[in-house]
Each structure stands twice: as structure tokens, then as C-alpha cells.
Image: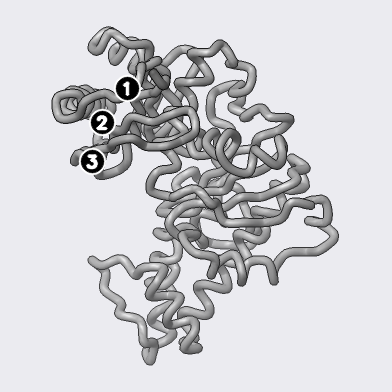
């Protein structure tokens, strides 16, 4: 019987549960509503989702364990979910709780780490063991894989590059306390906020501006292509910010490839425009290129969670370190 892992991806509004093979094939999956208002309630919802999934689906393989990815800071070695974000912290030994509840080994990781792990085993990692994975969605985060190792840091917090300053002269203050962080300009939420900020200067914009409604990236693209000056200002600012972020990461980690994921990168529009802002000398050693992930963005974290379970069950922890 084929070995499989039960994988769980906790997102902001849903929990995706699935049975996954080592090759990344999702045999069955189910989506459940969720919330991450606090860690305890989210933990209980994860337990309920797994219970419901096991009642609704026949397990097709030989389960080696459960892999879970969650938002926030995670200590994988301890199986401890430390916090959703600074100020919202209730450390929970999530792996132990799930293992006891379902009598299966369990391992946990952060959602962006999970996506990078999937890239390492199922995606770009088949070409190189040195790459950067940058996720641009509602927020921005990245992970560095160097010599086939996912860098996690001394406090399980490596890769929170959304708080890398890309504009030293900016008056925009980030939640981290600094000014000019890339997330302020280039995340999905950041571009929305920048649109609201500059809208009074562009009364003729074709964009629909409402305080209680998010301006989507697709709307910005459509307006950008129509030469709307507000969209051009916001998106070009975002492109410059991500270009600075990317080149900084390239200088620091010396990758052979840079892979982009997340909602803003769901097609290659952003990347095609981004490369025009990159300095050729800075990225000359990125020999395997800049690319959007080939893994399904709706499934990549789930596949990464399963990959974590296979790696840890087989005692290959060093490939994750």
C-alpha cells in the first residue's frame, strides 16, 4: 500500500485537509470554514476538521502521520505554535495535541515555510538546492533555501521580509514600528492602502474607491493597462519595492533561482513587469531565473505540509533544518 500523509492547511478563513502522496498527488481533500482569531479556537477547529474529514473520506494509503501548516510563528522541532503575529500569542504544543487526539505522529510548520518546502521537494528544488521563495499576497514573506536547507533562524522567525525597508524616506509607518517596509507598498493590502492614500490627487481615476471595499490587484492591473495614472503610480511603486526586496535577498543569500507565489503572483503579469526594475549586475548569478511557482497556489501549502510529514517520519530532518 502506498504511504500517504494527512495534510492540513490552516488559512485565514478556511482549513484544507487532504490525503497526499510523497509525489504530491492529492488523493482526496475537503475544505472547512475556519478562523484564526486566536490559537486555541483555531486548534479546536483543526481537530474538528480532521475528525470530519476522517468520517467523510476513506483513507486510501498507509498514513505515516499528519502534517499541518498554520499562519504565524512555529517551532517545528518542538511542535509548538508560538503566535499568530506579535501581540497575539498563546503558545500551544499543537503537534502533541493533534498526535494524541488522532493517535498518529504529527508535525507542524508555518504556511510560507510549507510552500517553500513543497518547492524544495516538488518544484524548483529538483533543479537547485539554493533558491528564494517569495510569497506576495495580503502580506509579504519569504523563505531562503540554502544548500538544500530551509533556513528557520534562532527564533523560528527567518524570512519575515515584509518588514524589510525599501524606502528610507517614506513617512508610511508599518505595524512593526519602522517606516518604508515593502509590505506597505507591495502586498495586496498595501496596494489597496496606497490607492486610498493617493486617490484624492486623482479624482478622474477609473478605479472604484470605497473605504469599506478592498481595491483588488486585478482591478489595479486593468486600470494600469488602461493608463490610469493612479493605478500606474500604485503599481509602479509596488514593482520598485519588490524589485528592491528581491535584489536585497539575492545579495544576501546568493540563490540560483527566485520563485514567486501568492495571490498577487497568480499569473505572470507582475513578474513580467518586475524584471524591468531589476539590476542586471545584481541578479547575474540567478542563473536558473526568476519564475512564478508551477505548483498550484491553492494546494502548495497543503503539499508542503504533507512533505514535512514524510521528511520527519523518515528521519531526514536535516533537509528541513
- Residue located at (48% from left, 24% from top): 308
The label shown at residue 31 is 3
Q: Are marks 1 and 2 in contact (CB under 8 Å)?
A: yes
Q: Distance from label 1 to label 2 (Cα)? A: 8 Å
What secondary structure is marked by label 2?
loop
- Left or right of 287: which side holds 240? left
What secondary structure is marked by label 3?
strand
Q: Badge 1: few (under 14), some or many (20 or more) residues near its Cα, within 10 Å? A: few
For the question of whether residue 174 can be seen, the reply is no
For the N terminus, the quadrant is top left
Tell which circle, 1 or 2, labels the residue nearer the N-terminal end: 2
Q: How many marks?
A: 3
Percent position of residue 116, x then y:
55, 38
- Left or right of 60: which side holds 296? right
Q: Is residue 146 above or below residue 319?
A: below
The label shown at residue 90 is 1
Tell which circle, 3 or 1, labels the residue nearer the N-terminal end: 3
Percent position of residue 286, x then y:
77, 51
Q: Distance from label 2 to label 3 (Cα)? A: 20 Å
Residue sitting nearer the eye, 55 or 109: 55
Q: Is residue 67 above or below residue 266?
A: above
Tell which circle, 2 or 3, labels the residue nearer the N-terminal end: 3
The label shown at residue 38 is 2
Amino acid at each position: 500500500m502506498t504511504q500517504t500523509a494527512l495534510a492540513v492547511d490552516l488559512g485565514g478563513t478556511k482549513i484544507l485537509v487532504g490525503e497526499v502522496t510523497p509525489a504530491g498527488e492529492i488523493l482526496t481533500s475537503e475544505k472547512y470554514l475556519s478562523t484564526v482569531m486566536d490559537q486555541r479556537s483555531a486548534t479546536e477547529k483543526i481537530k474538528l476538521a480532521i475528525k470530519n474529514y476522517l468520517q467523510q473520506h476513506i483513507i486510501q494509503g498507509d498514513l505515516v502521520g499528519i502534517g499541518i501548516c498554520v499562519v504565524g510563528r512555529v517551532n517545528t522541532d518542538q511542535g509548538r505554535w508560538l503566535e499568530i503575529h506579535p501581540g497575539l500569542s498563546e503558545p500551544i504544543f499543537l503537534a502533541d495535541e493533534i498526535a494524541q487526539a488522532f493517535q498518529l505522529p504529527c508535525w507542524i510548520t508555518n504556511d510560507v515555510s510549507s510552500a517553500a518546502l513543497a518547492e524544495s521537494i516538488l518544484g524548483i528544488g529538483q533543479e537547485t538546492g539554493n533558491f528564494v521563495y517569495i510569497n506576495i499576497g495580503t502580506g509579504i514573506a519569504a523563505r531562503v533555501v540554502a544548500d538544500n536547507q530551509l533556513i528557520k533562524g534562532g527564533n523560528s522567525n527567518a524570512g519575515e521580509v515584509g518588514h524589510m525597508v525599501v524606502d528610507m524616506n517614506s513617512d508610511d509607518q508599518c505595524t512593526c514600528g519602522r517606516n518604508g517596509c515593502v509590505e506597505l507598498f507591495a502586498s495586496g493590502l498595501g496596494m489597496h492602502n496606497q490607492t486610498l492614500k493617493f486617490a484624492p490627487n486623482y479624482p478622474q481615476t477609473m478605479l472604484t474607491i470605497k473605504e469599506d471595499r478592498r481595491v483588488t490587484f486585478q482591478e489595479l492591473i486593468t486600470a494600469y493597462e488602461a493608463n490610469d495614472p493612479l493605478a500606474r503610480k500604485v503599481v509602479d511603486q509596488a514593482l520598485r519595492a519588490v524589485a528592491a526586496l528581491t535584489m536585497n535577498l539575492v545579495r544576501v543569500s546568493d540563490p540560483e533561482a527566485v520563485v514567486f507565489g501568492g495571490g498577487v503572483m497568480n499569473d505572470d503579469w507582475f513578474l513580467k513587469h518586475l524584471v524591468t526594475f531589476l539590476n542586471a549586475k545584481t541578479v547575474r548569478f540567478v542563473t536558473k531565473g526568476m519564475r512564478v511557482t508551477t505548483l498550484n497556489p491553492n494546494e502548495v501549502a497543503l503539499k508542503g505540509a504533507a512533505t514535512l510529514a514524510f521528511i520527519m517520519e523518515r528521519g531526514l530532518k536535516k533537509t528541513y533544518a
